[in-house]
Structure formats: C-alpha cells, structure tokens
Amino acid sequence: MTAIERAQLAQLIDHTLLKPEATAADVEALLREAEELGTYSVCVSPSMLPVETSVKVATVCGFPSGQHASSIKAAEAADAVAKGADEIDMVINIGLAKAGDFAGVQADIAAVREAAPAPTVLKVIIESAALSDEEIIAVCEAAEKAGADFVKTSTGFHPAGGASEHAVALMRRTVGDRLGVKASGGIRTRAAAEAMVAAGATRLGLSGSRAVLEGDTAGEGY
C-alpha cells in the first residue's frame, strides 16, 4: 500500500468533536487545531453552530440513534444549514433497515436531502457494524436513490463497533465512483487511516487527527 502524504491525508479528514460533554471552549480548540493541521473540515454537534473557521463545517443530524422522526431530522438539517453548516452527516433509521424497509430508509434520507439541498453535502451514516452485508448494500442503494453525496460507516457511538475495511470496500463497490465513502469510528492510527483509504474511503472522521497525521497510536478515533 502506498503511503499517503501528510497534507493529502489531512484533506480527507473531518476533524471531529461530538462528545456530549464538549464545551464551547473545546470546540474553539478543535477549530484552531483543524486550521493548524490543514484538515478538510470540522464536524461538531449542531448546538455548537454557528462557528467561525477557515475550513468547511459539518454537523450531525438524527445523531446518534437515527430513531428521530424524518420531519425532525429535516428541521435539524435546515437549521444547521441556516447556521452555516456546509455538510450534514445524518443517521439512517437503523430499525427500518433491520426490518427490511429500505423504501422507508430512502424516504427518511430524501426528507433530509429536500431540507438541505445542494450545494450542501449530505453524508448518510448507515451504522455498518450493526448491518449484514446485504443490508449494507441495500441502504447504500437507498442513499444513492435519495440523492446523498456520501455513505458513511458509523457514528462511533454504537456498541457494535465502528468502521471496518470490509464495510468500506463493500460500500465502495455498491456506490462505485458516484458517491463518496466516509469511514469513521475507531480509526486511531496512521496505518488504520491509510487502510481505510485503500479500501475505498474518500473521507475520514477522526477525533484524534493530530496523532494519526503524526503517525502516533494515541489518537482517540470516534
């Protein structure tokens, strides 16, 4: 596997802080660190918006359970865009996916897409560790049909786990080059980050970005 230049890797990173106990001061520190490291964006909780930064701003929607009414997810996304979010990372209704209601999954995503139209980037968190391969394929297809820009592995908060190379590769095969694939959850080392990119990830969600970029093993991952 070819090593990725540090600056190139940094431009794949959504530098992330979604801990429930995060303070405004913590977010301010995140913003400054993202600018220093040259990451593509920051990803913060919607209550922290708006923020002032020179990088892109992402936030989450229906996070972390996905069990919000579609109308609430749509309103949350619209509010975030009004407060300056460039990108929305929404969680699917995982229960619908487990029940095989992929039309319901698509409708849920479509409601958010309608509330946050292009040029807002919509990433769809599928919680891949909680799904079978067949379910992963079906929800990725639903996300594409609903107009999403990315499919994303994980919230980082589900007990089933975070990103895996297998899930990333399967997601990439499903969406081809038509959508982006974001790997997030438990990516704590430079080697793990590069493995996700090799598997097909075009964006990485990291909370320990500095450690990963510096080749350390102490990054938190999320």
Image (cartoon, helix red, strand yellow):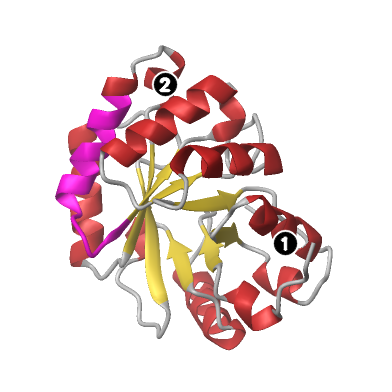
Mark 1 crowdedness (10 Å alpha carbons): few <14, some 14-19, many ≥20:
many
Residue 194, which numbered label? 1
Mark 2 crowdedness (10 Å alpha carbons): few <14, some 14-19, many ≥20:
many
Q: Position of residue 121 (x, y in %)?
A: 32, 59
Residue 138 in which image quadrant: top left
Determine the residue positioned at 41% across, 42% down: 63
Relative to 203, does residue 9 appear above or below in the rendering? below
Q: Position of residue 168 (x, y in %)?
A: 60, 43
Check disc 2 and report the residue beneath it: 97
Q: Is residue 81 left or right of residue 153?
A: left
Label 1: which secondary element: helix
* Front-lying residue, 219 or 199: 199
- Which range of residues does the magenta coloring cover? 104-121
* 117 inside magenta stretch: yes
Label 2: which secondary element: helix
Residue type indicated by callout 1? Glu
Q: Position of residue 163 (x, y in %)?
A: 64, 43
Residue type indicated by callout 2? Ala
Q: Is residue 48 left or right of residue 20?
A: left
Q: Name the chief secondary structure element in magenta.
A: helix
Q: Position of residue 219 (x, y in %)?
A: 74, 63
* 122 inside magenta stretch: no
Determine the residue positioned at 66% across, 35% down: 161
Residue 124 in which image quadrant: top left
